[in-house]
Image (cartoon, grey):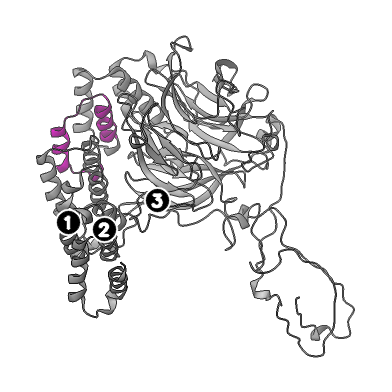
Amino acid sequence: PVVANLKAHLGQEMFIRIIDNETGISAIPYVGHDKLAHINFDNFRFHATRPTFPNELNQKDIIVLPPLDPILHAGLSGKEAAKAMTLPKGFKITLAASEPDIVRPISFTMDPRGRLWVVEGHTYPIPAPEGQGKDRILIFEDTDGDGTLDKRKVFMEGLNLVSGIEVGMGGVWLGAAPYLLFIPTDFTQDKPTGPIQKLLDGWGVQDTHEVLNSLRWGPDGWLYGTHGVFTHSNVGKPGATDQERTKINAGVWRFHPKTHVFEVFAEGSSNPWGIDFNEYGHPFITVCVIPHMFHIIQGARYQRQGGKHFNPYTYDDIKTIADHVHYVGDRGPHAGNFRSASAGGGHAHAGAMIYLGGNTWPKEFRNNIFMNNINGAKLNVDILTPKGSGYSASHKKDFLAMNDSWSQWLNMKYDPSGSVYAIDWYDKNQCHSNNPDVHDKTMGRIFKITHETDVFVRVDLSKSTDQELVNHQLNPNEWYVRQSRTILQERGGNAQVFKALRDILDKNPDVTRKLRALWTLQVTGGLTEMDLENLLGHESPHVRSWAIQLACEKKVISASFLSKLESLAKTESSAQVRLAMLSGLMRLRPEMRWNVVEALAQKSEDRLDHNIPLMVWYAAEPLAAIDPMRSLAMAEKAKMPKFLLYMVQRIGAIKSLESKKVLEGFMGQLGNNHEQHEIMMAAEKILKEK
């Protein structure tokens, strides 16, 4: 029952209205968790004095959320949907394609001609039996520059649960759980030149909206993708044993198109459905439910929506870089569903586009990351600002409002003209369901956003000479940069290409152009370890960082390079470079890490950094099993928060006589320091265990 004091209304006629804030939209009640969420009016009694009841509802427990967001439109035609959208001044949106020409677009990419390769996801959400898939790949082209994709062809049909696509390096790459597929292709004829190749298998399908997705070429020449938390994959080449496979259930992965090496690049997050790289080659992902933005570091471990990290000695993980969320209220992300227009729309996001599309769009949008807010039907924008070793992400005014609750953009990409294409799944149901009948099966759209200064261009980079492709590394539009780099990677390098790229690396004053040249030298085979060792002394921390990352690619470095890293660890002034050293160390054998970790662990200037304290721990953790005494001594000198506590816990987990003696000796000299009470308690607990 609820008790209300009505003395102020004594003698007045009353009308009672019971307001129920639980709408049924959210699974989270807006009243106390131990109370009923639905209100029933059963009786009304007056009392001369205030009564008390054992099950009385405390009104302080009631959280009143903002009202439901207004639904302006729903179930519009493609043309009506385009007209309903609102954009900043100077921009317009065009319906490029719609049903029946495109239905259920789930992923897309662009080829060197600026054409769109779009996957229709007819099989989702239930995988079909082998050979009975219904997905297909369509190729769209705007032949006259009016914004409409007037040319359409079917590339392939009969595919099964496709969730990601990329083209280049001789063919079409598909994420189609349980497989990573490759289709060798003649792009002059747009026809396969051989059977579909199953490069990897073991991708899980437990939750089919959290499978491998968002395929994209990285600046280092690897194929990157993301993976959700509630699908459990054990990935390897077909026929691989369990020991030869790699587990992943949340994070970022990559696959090398030439060596066919598969790696988990970073672990954690929730259900990422979008990855992109900024102009310095740093990856970012957008996610759902948990805070939405993460700067991805090779070897790092991030906050998870659920489950545990594969390494049991992780102890803590790196959190979001966002200083905000896109939902209202303090009862968690779901409680704000359909009430959060003022904050950005809600917790669910799809797509990631860091706009680097040239000089036609206003400069204020360059390097901003765009993501679609599924609940709010808005294009959210975050500003990425360098901070310490990484970045912070702050909220910028939403770029676009669809004003249509059925709109569900899944990804966005800029084209050769700097305009942006977006695919819209368009469905009344906004959440994943295993019931196929819940999802619409007839609609889908592609939209194009243009600025008034955009100029349509027709291009075919596949016909460009090597020198022309090298020159495109200076183009302000990264579309040209990335496409050209991939073509050069496929062709392979030669002396003329290497010289032209080295000239850019050595002489161009813009560090982003130096990096483009460095990456292209890497993917074409134009770099030696000595080249990278020499770059450790470069004036730009971005170049020094990438020299370290690229040198550690093969998981082994020379004694000379390691010696340089050990010296650099003592003197390096850039937190970004110190982070790169830690990331690189994690690819090396643990016994090679000692001197660098010991030096970086003592950098007090990094103790409050967003990334470095935990990256120091991740790099140092395996050392405990190699030499507990030395590891503990290193931890005692370290300036990183909780590093000593974690090392004590890790040594205790070894459960050997040696590790026990190390901790006993440590306890004997620890004393009664109040600041180390938590460490003492942990050590005492470990020593008491059998």
Query: Mark 1 sits on what residue?
Result: 627
Label 3–label 1 contact, CB within 8 A: no
Locate residue 139 relative to residue 582 in the image: left or right.
right
Q: How crowded is mark 3: few (under 14 residues within 10 Å), some or many (20 or more)?
A: many
Q: Give the image location of residue 133, x and y in percent.
A: 58, 23
Q: How crowded is mark 2: few (under 14 residues within 10 Å), some or many (20 or more)?
A: some
- Tell me: residue 55, above or below residue 235: below
The residue type indicated by label 3 comes to: His
Tell me which label, 3 or 1, sits earlier in the chain: 3
The residue type indicated by label 1 comes to: Asp
Query: Mark 2 sits on what residue?
Result: 654
Query: Mark 3 sits on what residue?
Result: 309
Q: Give the image location of residue 526, x and y in percent.
A: 20, 25
Residue segment shown in magenta: 513-542
Tell me which label, 3 or 2, sits earlier in the chain: 3
- Which label lies toward us, 1 or 2? 2
Residue drawn at the location 72% of the way across and 40% of the way down? 74
Q: In which quarter of the image is residue 427?
A: top right
| Prevailing secondary structure of the magenta residues | helix
Q: Give the image location of residue 24, x and y in percent.
A: 71, 55
Q: Which residue is at the front of the view, 83 or 576? A: 576
